[in-house]
Image (cartoon, grey):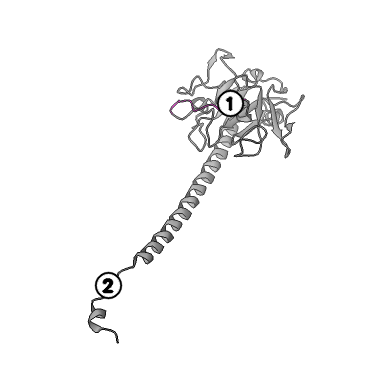
Amino acid sequence: MPNPRMNRHASPGFTLVEMAVVLLILSLLAGSLGAGLSSHLARRAERATDDALDEARDTLLGYALRKGHFPCPAKSPQDGAEDRNGGSCARHVGLLPWATLGIHGMDGWAHRLRYAITPAYTRNIVNVDDGTIEIVTRNLDGAELKLTTAGGLTPVVILSHGPNGLGAVAADGSLLPAPLTGSDEARNTDTSGRLFVSRSLSENPGAPGGAFDDRVSWISPNLIAHRLIGAGRLP
């Protein structure tokens, strides 16, 4: 027969096993929420980067319509004015001249956008000729394919170095670590500014061209001709 005196003094608290189960459930919930938040932040940064690339393309085209030519790259990681001396550019690949364009010029990870321009397009545009910049990609087997070919090379490239930021410049002007030598991401940091890689995202360092998270945009000569003719700058 139960002892009523013992029942009156029984502890209403959790047992150690029950507490362990509760802690396990809370840990699982926290992990799920953390993963969901991380995924949400990653998607938001990607959308912000795509918006920044679109804004850069539109403002570059707007600048060309107003001035008759495209701007030079920025003077330095701290100075976003174009590096122009009279009618010439000091360089033709570097950072987007965000101050000259009047935009932030940063991707969703607070890295400066990279910019390459065909030299002839930094002077008064009287004919829309082919550019000097080649874009390549890779097929499913990893083989390299051309996105632009002779007779269709692009004049302008804008890119983000992606979430890993390898080769990028931070908002404070500091240089982030360089990509692995020989990788496709390293090719996108080449100072010649003559060839860029745009391909599917990959976290596999063993993939052809290595891991890749750069986001690349460009402006074709056909689009430039369409805008300049529409604005009456070209016949």
Is residue 79 positioned above or below 212 on the image? above
Q: Main secondary structure of the magenta part?
A: loop
- Residue at 55% x, 43% y is 47
Q: Secondary structure at mark 2?
A: loop
Query: Hey, which residue is sitting farthest front in the picture?
Result: 1
Crowding near pointer 1: few (<14 within 10 Å), some, many (20+)? many
Q: Nearer the viewer, mark 1 or mark 2?
A: 2
Q: Position of residue 61 (x, y in %)?
A: 61, 30
Q: Amino acid at mark 2?
A: Ser
Mark 2 and mark 1 in contact (Cβ < 8 Å)?
no
Res 41 label? none
Q: Position of residue 32 (x, y in %)?
A: 48, 55
- Residue at 57% x, 16% y is 91
Q: Position of residue 89 (x, y in %)?
A: 57, 15
Number of marks drawn: 2
Let me know if residue 173 is in the magenta part: yes
Query: Hey, which residue is sitting farthest bottom in the picture?
Result: 1
Q: Amino acid at mark 1?
A: Tyr
- Residue at 62% x, 29% y is 183
Q: Secondary structure at mark 1?
A: strand
Let me know if residue 194 is in the magenta part: no
**Bounds of the magenta segment:** 172-181
Residue, disc 2: 11
Residue, disc 1: 115
The quadrant in which the N terminus is found is: bottom left
Compare marks 1 and 2 and give the one earlier in the sequence. 2
